[in-house]
Image (cartoon, coloured by chain):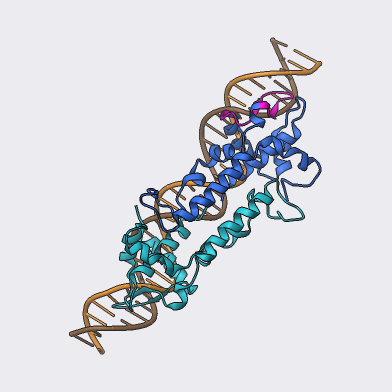
Chain colours: A cyan, B blue, C orange, D brown
Amino acid sequence: MFSKTCEYAIRALIFIAEKSVNGRRVGIKEIAEGIESPEYFIAKILQDLSRRQMVKSIKGPNGGFFHDAETLNKSLADIVRATDGDKVFSGCGLGLRQCSETRPCPIHNDFKIIRKNIQEMLEHAKIGTFSKDLAKKLTFLKN
Amino acid sequence: MFSKTCEYAIRALIFIAEKSVNGRRVGIKEIAEGIESPEYFIAKILQDLSRRQMVKSIKGPNGGFFHDAETLNKSLADIVRATDGDKVFSGCGLGLRQCSETRPCPIHNDFKIIRKNIQEMLEHAKIGTFSKDLAKKLTFLKN
DNA sequence: CAAATAAAAGATATTCTTGTCTTTTATTAG
DNA sequence: CTAATAAAAGACAAGAATATCTTTTATTTG
């Protein structure tokens, strides 16, 4: 469904949301450990997400990644768009570039519904809303 | 959502279903042209699908690919499983190997529903059911 | 200011997917 | 039986995604 980059991105931003409370910043090592991802790889991903304003970062001692009110309110759909583009939301299930209402592939209508469900779910899910369950260990970000 | 291999596979098997009527066999070139796929690539894919009994094939003059009653009745879900395995139906949205009811990722429950919708849709869609709309040019397999 | 810290940036390596070409095998028609 | 046909099989190539390492820049603390 999503690329590895996107999976790590979502996990990392949710992790940061839980760990970065009252001004605390989270370092790459802690993030990589916390979501069980390759350290250098998630570093690259966060670099990019930071440029795209999906997360905040500060260099130097006591630096690291964190969220503010704005980034906390970003949705998983925003993360998916930032990493994988919008093909998940608008691409054809059979890979046709021109699939549309007027020139549909055989499963166009079924996929339209499914894609809509996926998008609604992801638009509705805000980064900041997962911290409680994580803290209570009702949900998990690594194996 | 699906790999290129899977997209081509679905398009090819649907194409063969439409073209291979009363005993006629469809050749690789015609298939590649008909679904706008790389010729050698779809050849490899069909080779594999043939081994897996998702389509029938015969070598030599007048040979080619075709369906019988059994393969016509295979579902798109069968094709997806044959090419991409079952990660589409059972994998974790965030890539966790161990995501489960007892150790769910943060979006486990939402994804369970979506995956179920996708699977039901694909299980219900049989290869043989798309020919009429294709013939009427109501649906398309290439750009 | 100097040293330490941590992310940013740039370069490189590895693996997997996708795509291509060549040789072999099975089948048919003459 | 021979030649032609078409898929099967095997080998190889290109590209994209994933992963790693090194150098640079910004920031903080002493």
Q: In the image, B1: left or right of A41?
A: right
Measuring from the top left, give residue B94's x and y in whole percent.
Answer: 44, 55
Task: Relative to A57, say whether B23 is above or below.
Answer: above
From the viewer's side, name the closer residue of B141 and A115: A115
Task: Relative to B22, say whether B39 is above or below.
Answer: below
Query: Which residue corresponds to the image point at 46% horizontal and 47% vertical from the top-left?
Result: B91
Q: Is residue B67 magenta?
A: yes
Task: Relative to A126, say whether B70 is above or below.
Answer: above
From the viewer's side, name the closer residue of A67 and A6: A67
Picture quadrant where residue A40 is located: bottom left
Picture quadrant where residue A45 is located: bottom left
Measuring from the top left, give residue B23's x and y in whole percent.
Answer: 75, 24
Query: Which residue corresponds to the image point at 75% horizontal and 34% vertical from the top-left?
Result: B19
Whether residue B3 is visible: no
Q: In the image, B97: left or right of A97?
A: left
Q: Is residue A35 magenta?
A: no
Whether residue A54 is visible: yes
Task: Relative to A85, say whether C7 is above or below.
Answer: below
Measuring from the top left, give residue B113's x and y in whole percent.
Answer: 52, 51
Residues rendered magenta in the picture: B51-69
Measuring from the top left, give residue B133's x and y in whole percent.
Answer: 77, 42
Q: In the image, B114: left or right of D3?
A: left
